[in-house]
Structures are given as structure tokens and as C-alpha cells.
Amino acid sequence: MIRHVVLVGLSGTGKSSVGRAAALELGWELVDTDEEIERRTGKSIPDIFRDDGETAFREIEQGVLREALSRDQVVVATGGGAVVDPRVWSSTLLASSQSLAIWLDADAATLIERLRTQAATIGAAADRPLLAGDNALARLGLLRDQRVEAYTRADIALDVSARTVSEVTADIVAMARLGCGQELRIDLDVATAHSAIHVGVGARFRAGELIRQRWPKARRIWVAIDANLEPQLQDEIETMRETSAMRVEVLPVPSGEASKSMLGLERLHDWMLGSGIERGDIVVAMGGGMVGDLAGFAAATVLRGVGLMQLPSTLLSMVDSSVGGKTGINHRHGKNLIGAFYQPTEVVIDSSFLGSLPQRELRSGWAEIVKHAVIEPSVPGKSAGALLGVLERNVSALLALSNPIVPWTIGRNVALKAAVVEADEREAGIRAYLNFGHTIGHGIEAAGYSLLHGEAVAVGMCASLFIARELDLIDESFENRIRELIVAFGLPVRAEVDPDLVRQMTKTDKKKSAGRQKWVLPVRNGGVTITTDVPEVLAQRAIQNVTGAA
């Protein structure tokens, strides 16, 4: 359980301002180590450096930090060099499970500009003794190089270069709350429905309580669960019975895409109708995207619609299929060609499911998260590049499934998708942004089911990046940046499938306008655009570039 949030980083990253705002929002105490040192000594920081030397200053600083970390519910804004001493990274200080260390980072030019603004605004109080003299930019770069090894030991790294104090504060507060065992809630509102989306560690054990609160007059809960999960989730199902005080019916759904069919849908309908489902009852989809799509469509169609809760168990379904109301089944002519838009009233996302997932399934989910990071600048109300920066700087922590960075990242993706769906539920406009990487990706997936959905999307994103660069929509550096991130998450950048078959399957993709293929392509300065103006020969080159033998 988190008791302390410790902000580390160079001068000018906003540690004091963000720390003050975060402490206020959390209702915690703030300890600004520089301010506390000045209060105790009666001297300014520059005077201590001048009169007593840096060594003496660091000793005082260490004492202040240790004392702050002995308290509960404290936000600590450290000085730029406070964490260079390896002793502060002991298991009783910053490496403690009770401390969340967050590195605020920014490019050197941004930091120099901020420091100069501070100096012009508040004068000598903004002096930074280690940055005095000429060539401030070079000196700051050198200082960063000297300290970066210490900063990278932080639990989480945030790029604050182009972000406001309020934006950074909101992220840190959310992370702190998750680290304290609280949940994030994201609300999705469309014209005809409302979804309450809950994200947290252990959230699945609250499903019954949420059902009782939202549907107090319901009599029965109908749980469609992935057959591979059912033996592992008996405790969760029993908790649902107890906390909802309702009868719970359970139907295991055979794993695999074959269940997402007319036959699979009929099986669910037969089960529910044959056992007396009523309009006031609730369907719970418990499993990955296949179960969510199938059970969601069953809930949308049985008795012309009953209550629906999505309880996703895979990373892919948490950040993608469980949110937004798309339900459906496959057809021999393609994936997801039969279905309905049907918003789940409740979505419960529990990141602790991820620890039991096979690595390949986890990687598949990271593909959708990378996709969201690319489209984020085009999403209404979202910060340009914030998610992309988090992914690039926290790959190791994310792959290690560290808390709270993983549930926070899931929540960020859910909020992004919710914003897109609120603006365009029926995919008449910007919801198509979510199809970045899917045009050729679906063709690759349909050409042979050897690749998981996320793996195919990763390759599809590489194809779209290739097209965008050829059309001069992006620079090669951006293409390489995203490809490197895809590789960092263990995802493929090409698929060993027949390019001719991929071309054929891509032409059957349902995302067309006036008979022309719609493409979602990245653009300069971030975000994506939707176009039908991709020459056929270029599309074929893109497919050739990412398919076939390496």
C-alpha cells in the first residue's frame, strides 16, 4: 500500500508545483525538501552551497528526506540531486513498497526556458546553484547525464515537456490512488446509454456489489465465461452470488474464435431462453474479447436486450473490446460482420488478471495500447503525446506488470476510447481512428489464424506507417520510433503469410466508404487522419513490405 509519493528529477520539471497540487488533491501532507531545508537552517539554498558546500547540503537534505518518509500520506518534492546518493534507494526508503517514486523529466531546452521564466518572475529565489554560469544548456545536459542513472531507478517516469501542472497532477493523483487500493472510474455517455467503467487491482471481486447497486430488482445473473477460466474463477463466482444476493447461472464457452459464430450465439440463446431469462436479468461476459463480443451480442438480442456487464480477463479486451459497445460474431466472409452496438452498463477491469496470462496474449494487448498512443493527439480532450511518452519511458515496468503503472495505463486507454466513442458511437467519423493498423491487420489475421489479433494489428500498424511515410505524411524518424516501440513490447513487425492472400482478405474488410478502402494513417505533429486516397499499388507495396518470408 502506497504511503508516500516522491517526485524526483531535475530543476524546472515542476516537482514543487505538481507536488503541492497533488498533495492538495489527495488530502496529504507536502514536504518540499528545499523549502524545509531553508526553514530549518534559516539560509537560502545558494547560501548553504556557498558557505557550507554541497556535501554539507546533501547531508541535511538526506535527513529531511528520511524524516519525510517516516510519515504517512506524504507527497515529497525533492531537490534535483536528492536521490543521487544510492543510500536513498534502500528498501526502507525509496525502494520500499510503501513509496512511489516518480521521475518528472523534460528536454533540456524546456527546462532552461522554465528556469529563466522563474528567475524573471521571482528573482533570486529561483536561483539554481548547480546551473550558475555560462552555457546553461550544456551544463544542464551534463547534469542530467550524471544523474540519469539515479532517476531511472524511479518506479515511473513521466515526460512533462509539453504538459501542464494540472495534467501531470491528475496522472500522479490517479497513480497514487491506485497504489492505495482505490479504483479509477471512467464514465462513458452516449445518446441512449451510460457505461460506468471501473479499473483497479482486485476490482473483479466487486462485480456482485456493483450489480446489486445498479440492478437492485434483478433476479438472476447469467455468466458466460471462457471455459479455460471457469475452474480458476470459482471464488469470484461465489463472491458474486454472495454480494449480489442473486441466483447466478454459469455457462462455460469453449475457447477460440470458433465459438464466435451463429452456432455459438444460438447456444447462448438456448441456454438463457430455455432456463427462463427475464428482461430484468443481467448477462456477465467473463473472459477475453471472444466471450465479450459473443455474450454482448447475446445480451443485445435476447428478449430484445437485457442488462450487460463486461468483465474482461485479457489486456486486449480490457483496453479494447470491453469498452465502446461493439458486439458481434464472425461470418465466413469475414470477422465481426454480424453484430450490434450495445453499451455495457458496467465494465469491471481488474489488472490482477494479467499475472496469469500467457506472455503472447499479453503482448497482443500491448499492440492496442501502442495504437491508442499513436492516435491520442487526434482524440477530443486528450493530451498530445502523453501516452506515447509513458509507454516509451516505462517499457520495463509495464512488461513486469508493476502497480500502479499498469492499471493507470489501462485506465488511460479506457478514457481515450471512451472519449472517441462519446464523440462517435456508430463509427460515422472519428471512431474510425481506432482502426489504425486494422485494415491490413485484419487481412493478415484473416489470411491465416496463426497470429493473434494484437500481433496482426502490430504488423498492420507497420504497414500503415510505411504508407504514411511514402505519402509524406510522416518522417522516417517517426516511423522508426513507433516500430521500435512495437518491438520493445515483443510484437512482430512482419508476418510470414502469403501477401496475395492478405491483399484478397483486405479487400473484404468492412471499413469502406462508397466502395473505397478507408485508411487510418499517422500524420506529422501527432495523431491520425482518415483517407481513401491510397493508390492500390502503394497498398500492395505496403503489404509486400510486412509479409512473406523475412
Image (cartoon, rainbow, N blue to C red):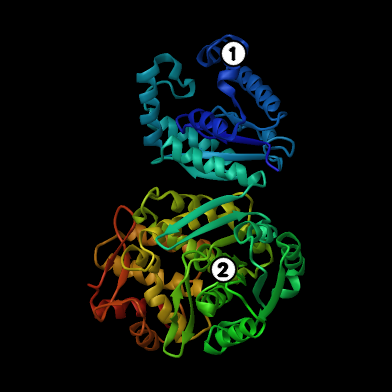
User: Residue 337, position in %: x, y?
Assistant: 42, 82
- State the quadrant of the N terminus: top right
Nearer to us in this view, 87 or 35: 35
Residue 422 falls in image quadrant: bottom left
Is residue 228 something that shows in the picture? Answer: no
In the picture, measured across the screen, residue 463 lies left or right of residue 306, that is left
Q: CA distance from mark 2 to mark 1?
A: 57 Å
User: Residue 408, position in %: x, y?
Assistant: 56, 51
Q: Which residue is denoted by mark 1 in the rendering? A: 39
In the picture, measured across the screen, residue 113 lies left or right of residue 341, that is left
User: Residue 172, position in %: x, y?
Assistant: 54, 41
Nearer to us in this view, 396 or 223: 223
Q: Secondary structure at mark 2?
A: strand
Q: Relative to 383, say whether 17 is above or below.
A: above
Q: Which residue is denoted by mark 2 in the rendering? A: 308
> Considering only order in the chain, which callout, 1 or 2, is on the residue closer to the N terminus?
1
User: Residue 297, position in %: x, y?
Assistant: 51, 77
Q: What amino acid does circle 1 point to?
A: Arg
Using a 10 Å C-alpha cutoff, classify the residue at mark 2 as few (fewer than 14 neighbours), some (14 to 19) or many (20 or more): many
